[in-house]
Amino acid sequence: MSILSDKDIKNLALKKKMIENFEPEQIRDNVISFGLSSYGYDFRLSEEFQIFKGKRLDPKNTKPQEWKKIKTKVLEISPGQTVLGRSIEYFRIPRDIITICYGKSTYARCGILLNVTPFEPEWEGFATLAITNTSKATVKIYAGEGIGQLIFLKAQNICKVSYKDKKGKYQNQKIITPAKL
């Protein structure tokens, strides 16, 4: 595997639509940075969130009515709370690419943990993001600004079975999607 450079990412984003709502330069002025970086892409947080209102989360039995949908430009996350968000960018991962995602260091320094699984070969959609406040204080997060960085890894060989081939349950996500079996 090799890490894609900014030139490779830009080429795939513009010619193959790997990233829609693509920002070809890193934007940093008065915002938590987003856009193309040297060896990755800093993606943005949308204004859509879901907050769990039930008493117990069960990944095998998640009920939509247990989630409160909200839309806001700034969300305050309580200590220990996890919320779901989504990316502004829509992704179409090529068959020979897989991604690894890390949270932005600005948020990490405030106790925010971003959990996003790898985008598998031929996965497509808006990313659903699990955002957890691990600190003892309430922390604000900002829609329209950077939330995580993707690193793109190119395989030497094409995979035998892609996410699309196996009809993955989170394929073509258009909305925030809680756990499903």
Image: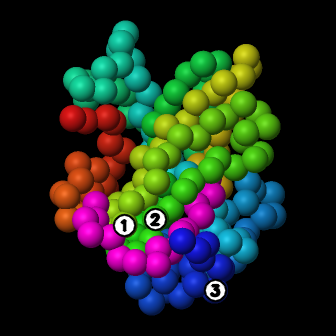
Q: Residue furthest top?
A: 55
Q: Residues within 10 Å of mark 3 (few under 14, many from 20)?
A: some
* Residue type beneath disc 3: Lys
In the visual, does 125 lie left or right of 105? Answer: left
**Secondary structure beneath label 3:** helix
Q: Quadrant of the N terminus?
A: bottom right
The answer to whether 123 appears left or right of 87 in the picture is left
Q: Which mark is residue 34?
A: none
Examine the rendered structure and indicate whether residue 147 appears above or below residue 119.
above
Tags 1 and 2 touching, CB below 8 Å: yes
Crowding at label 1, few (<14), some or many (≥20) Cα neighbours within 10 Å? Answer: many
Q: Position of residue 18 (x, y in %)?
A: 44, 76
Residue at (72%, 31%) from the top-left corner?
Answer: 111
Q: Which mark is residue 98?
A: 2
Q: Which residues are magenta?
A: 148-163
Question: Residue under circle 1?
Answer: 121
Residue at 28% across / 65% down in the picture?
Answer: 162
- In the rendered structure, does residue 150 fall within the stretch colored magenta? yes
Residue 10 image position (x, y, % from top left) = 57, 83
Q: Position of residue 4 (x, y in %)?
A: 60, 76
Which tag is nearer the camera, tag 2 or tag 3? 2
For residue 160, which quarter of the picture? bottom left
Q: What residue is at 20 percent from the left and 65 percent from the top?
A: 165
Looking at the rendered structure, which numbered label has been put on residue 7?
3
* Residue 178 horizontal/vertical position (percent): 33, 36
